[in-house]
Amino acid sequence: MVTRRDILKSAGAGTLALGLSSQPVFAAAEKAVKMEALMPPPKGNRVVVCGGGWAGLTVAKYLRRENPNIQVVLIEQRPNFFSCPISNPWLADLVNLDFIQYDYIQPALKYGYTFMNDKVIAIERDKKRVYTTRGYIEYNYLVLTPGIRYNYAPWFGDNKELIRLTKMNYPPAYIPGSEHIALKRKINEFEEGDFVVTVPPGAYRCPPAPYERVCMIAEVFKRNKVKGRVILLEPKDDIAPKGPGFRAAYDQVYLGIVEVVTKASIKEIDPVKKVIKTTAGDFKFTDANIIPPQQAGELVWMADLIAKDKEGKPTGWADQDPLTFQAKADPHVFFAGDVISPALGVTYPKSGHQANSQGKIVAKVIASRIAGKEIKPGSLMPENVCYSMVNGTPQEAIVINVNYEYNEKENKITPRPRTTNDRSEALAKATYEWARAMYRDMFS
Ligand SMILES: Cc1cc2nc3c(=O)[nH]c(=O)nc-3n(C[C@H](O)[C@H](O)[C@H](O)COP(=O)(O)OP(=O)(O)OC[C@H]3O[C@@H](n4cnc5c(N)ncnc54)[C@H](O)[C@@H]3O)c2cc1C
């Protein structure tokens, strides 16, 4: 667990390394990590939700719906919400920014929770306290919904300079913010050559998103009559999910623009010479969207609630009860969204729809517990729907729907996927209807 003391210690260590007196920095850090309570101690039940993305917004709203007496505080570091879903069509100007950007004030006022625009910097589970840059808040229940963090270590080890150069020059645009805007500018300004998109190894946010992004970049190149190719470097044996649907789009809509290279695990990246060495050969690129491996967001590490493998090494993802999403090590902490680990034989896709669906379950489980009741494990299961835009003119999409069944006897979860790989304009319309419904659910 990262505590306030650890933060102060690391601030001091930094100063000593510079050969300066540690005193001023300790004083500055003391000031930065205030001990002031941001709210009086909870009178009734207070749930603090850390991370206002797809999962956190849903937990906050549905907790208040379940029981308006629960005091809910949502802490989010960003001033406004930018949606990763539909950000790929936005890259190709199929929607405008208003469609994917929302304010945090309206839902907080409407559903009666407190929105705090602040960064969580420490968690003390023994004291049931969350520290932000401005002070601390006490909780009865804590929900950690920070999404993902990038993990360049499998590619670069601890080489911070290589990581910095790669991230800055080839932003992943997998966490909302400046990176998406930078990527949009890059693809619109691209004149000629090879634009590489990498698919991360291991579990990562929205498995089909890199393939959809390739279509949308190719759409911009086609529209701008760019003499260039989009090269997709896929570490797996083939692209999946929705592989046939994406393949058909690459071969029919973007023929000659998109090239897929499979079994291309990255061995080395030289961000200066612009070369990626893979198990399928070396690729020199003009520009790139380098999407790195991923892990659960920082807050789960801070709370010391990362799952461990058989050898005791961190898996990178939260250690949750597979059916209630409660932290295995702490009955007062819950997770939802991209942070969670595979469960009972199934790897839930890290998607906005899943995060929303899990958020509703977590809200019910916590509200029931507060009411002194327990929900039957497995009676509430998440679901997933994921559309991908594979053509911009006319707009056409493909889709996968997945339901999950829990078998109590075998203690196993079985996914039931249904994929439509035949792209259509009707599915493009359904994509936007889905997104509108999700934004309505979280914001209005
Ligand atoms: C390009 C792309 C396309 C996608 N398309 C789809 C799609 O079509 N359909 C779909 O269902 N999913 C899609 N996804 C996946 C979807 O975006 C994620 O699965 C979803 O955002 C996960 O929700 P979350 O709440 O776990 O994380 P997030 O939505 O990322 O929310 C986490 C929040 O926590 C905040 N946070 C983190 N640390 C702190 C801290 N210390 N203090 C305060 N706040 C903090 C972050 O700022 C962030 O707002 C796509 C993703 C990408 C990248």
Image (spheres, helix red, strand yellow):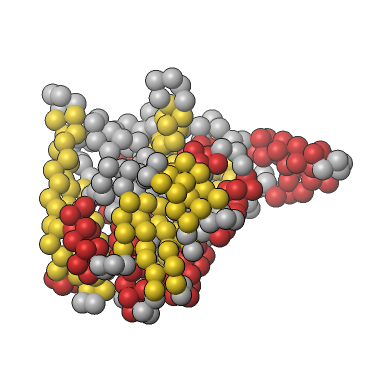
Please report the residue visible at 31 percent of the width from the left and 67 percent of the height from the top: 257
323 on left or right of 277: left
Q: Is residue 73 left or right of residue 239?
A: right
Residue 396 lies, in percent from the top left, at: 20, 70
Q: Nearer the viewer, residue 316 or 287?
A: 287
Camera-side residue of 270 and 424: 270
Image spot of residue 371 (x, y percent): 30, 39
Tell me where residue 399 appears, x and y as whole percent: 18, 58
Quarter of the rendering containing residue 271: bottom right
Answer above or below: position of 70 versus 376: below
Choose top left, top right, bottom left or bottom right for residue 397: bottom left
Residue at position x 50%, y 67% from top? Answer: 182
Quarter of the rendering occupied by the C terminus: bottom left
Name, please, the residue furthest toward the bottom: 224
Instruction: Residue at 79%, 45% (x, y): give it.
Output: 25
- Camera sees residue 198: yes
| Residue 144 visible somewhere in the drawing | no
Kindly indicate the quadrant of the structure image that contains residue 328: top left
